[in-house]
Image: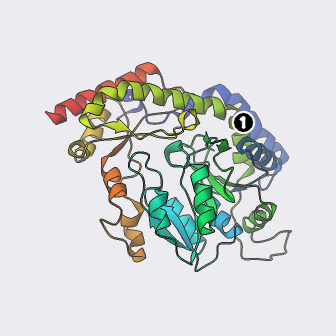
């Protein structure tokens, strides 16, 4: 399909960037003029601004969201031999980050309605080796901070929030990344706050965690040429930080547009509920930032999901699946010992979910077209 045939793209970054392109170009030019491409002025400015936006004291930029989890867990004291609980229903980077930190990921079931981690199920997984839990604020909706804090206090665990999809999401008086010991964010280009390449950041209120993060990301050197620990090279490029600095003031408005688009989807999709087709449940209202808008199909349609995508694509509508295979069934992680049937809810969701287009600036007519074509396709395949 050519670009001109696409009526509703899955993501439209050009729509987001065009109004601020001049400011972005100027910010990039200023970095080039200064020549401070690594750990430069714009990075310090962005770290300060992002920490303030999340309601925390510190933010430390790194090269990716995966590194944010890996280095963040290390900075929080996770060491080889520790176990870390994480939902199976997440992008694989959540698991990779734990493994890169040297710990063992202990996968947990999710809730069918919200797709978020099931804390009751997670409680059964705690052992004397369990040191942390990584709740994933999936699709832009936060796991309850109150419930997580109670869980962590009960089991004496560290909370490390995976906030990669939840920039400025909020609930119960907290922003994502604002209540755990630390949190990791991704700035992959399609994220609610995206760079022009890879990037990530760790937020925390703990000064010692922030200090260790700054060392770990920079070869384990708290000062130049003095390497006190085994670190790595994982720094958010100054040019990327400069771009993010321009975009950050617009993030709240962009998130609001996403939430409003989701509400319109919800309204238009109500007739399909009788056919057991419904959106993932929103328990956080306006605090849900809808990085993704995900619906559940009934099992009959789930088996025909690829055909649904093909038919909608033929009509100019792009869709996605987030995610088609749960982490415990990914071939690369078979050594962890999980098998089909271990997490039936996660497995069922992965078979039946479908992500519809959502982004700042998507119009009501576009949403109407998506739902209309989905309804037509569903009716055709149901009959």
User: On the rendered structure, is 345 left or right of 121?
Assistant: left
Q: Which residue is mark 1?
A: 246
Q: Is residue 363 left or right of residue 204?
A: left
Colour style of the rendered protein structure: rainbow
Residue 65 in sight here = no
**Is residue 312 shown above or below 48?**
above
- Give coordinates of residue 230: x percent, y percent: 72, 76
Secondary structure of the residue carrying tag 1 is helix
At x 69%, y 60%, the residue is 181
Left or right, residue 154 beside residue 338: right
The quadrant in which the C terminus is found is top left
- Which sits in the foreground, 139 or 112? 112
In percent of width and height, residue 314 lies at 28, 32
Quick one: 129 or 160, which is closer to the camera? Answer: 129
User: Measuring 51% from the left and 33% from the top, which residue is drawn there?
Assistant: 359
Q: Which residue is drawn at the image coordinates 17% and 31% (left, top)? A: 380
- Name the outermost residue toward the bottom: 81
Around disc 1, counting alpha carbons within 10 Å, would you say few (fewer than 14), some (14 to 19), or many (20 or more)? some
Which sits in the foreground, 227 or 158? 158
Q: Is residue 155 visible?
A: yes
Residue 266 occupies quadrant: top left
Query: Hey, which residue is sitting farthest top in the picture?
Result: 365
107, above or below 44, in the image: below
What residue appears at the point 59 percent right and 33 percent down from the top-left corner?
Answer: 255
Residue situated in front as seen by the camera: 114 or 244: 114
Q: Position of residue 135 (x, y in %)?
A: 55, 57
């Amino acid at each position: 399909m050519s670009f001109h045939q696409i009526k509703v793209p899955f993501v439209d970054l050009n729509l987001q960037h065009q109004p601020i392109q001049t400011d972005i170009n100027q910010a990039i030019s200023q970095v080039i003029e200064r020549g401070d491409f690594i750990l430069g002025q714009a990075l310090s400015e962005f770290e300060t601004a992002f920490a303030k936006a999340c309601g925390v004291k510190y933010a430390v930029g790194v090269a990716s969201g995966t590194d944010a989890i890996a280095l963040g867990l290390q900075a929080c004291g996770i060491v080889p031999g520790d176990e870390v609980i994480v939902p199976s229903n997440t992008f694989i980077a959540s698991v990779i980050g734990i493994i890169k930190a040297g710990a063992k990921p202990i996968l947990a079931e999710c809730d069918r309605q919200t797709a978020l981690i099931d804390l009751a199920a997670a409680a059964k997984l705690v052992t004397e080796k369990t040191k942390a839990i990584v709740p994933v604020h999936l699709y832009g909706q936060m796991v309850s901070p109150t419930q997580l804090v109670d869980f962590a206090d009960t089991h004496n665990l560290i909370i490390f929030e995976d906030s990669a999809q939840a920039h400025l999401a909020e609930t119960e008086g907290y922003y994502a990344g604002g209540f755990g010991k630390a949190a990791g964010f991704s700035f992959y280009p399609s994220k609610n706050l995206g760079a022009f390449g890879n990037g990530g950041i760790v937020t925390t209120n703990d000064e010692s965690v922030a200090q260790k993060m700054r060392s770990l990301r920079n070869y384990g050197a708290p000062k130049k040429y003095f390497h006190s620990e085994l670190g790595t090279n994982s720094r958010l490029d100054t040019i990327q930080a400069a771009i993010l600095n321009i975009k950050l003031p617009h993030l709240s408005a962009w998130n609001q547009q996403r939430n409003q688009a989701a509400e319109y989807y919800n309204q238009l999709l109500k007739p399909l509920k009788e056919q057991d087709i419904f959106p993932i449940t929103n328990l956080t209202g306006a605090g849900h930032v809808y990085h993704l808008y995900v619906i559940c199909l009934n099992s009959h349609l789930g088996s025909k999901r690829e055909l649904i995508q093909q038919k909608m694509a033929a009509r100019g509508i792009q869709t996605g699946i987030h995610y088609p295979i749960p982490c415990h069934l990914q071939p690369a992680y078979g050594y962890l010992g999980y098998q089909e049937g271990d997490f039936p809810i996660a497995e069922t969701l992965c078979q039946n979910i479908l992500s519809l287009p959502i982004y700042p600036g998507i119009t009501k007519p576009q949403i109407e077209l998506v739902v209309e074509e989905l309804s037509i396709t569903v009716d055709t395949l149901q009959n």
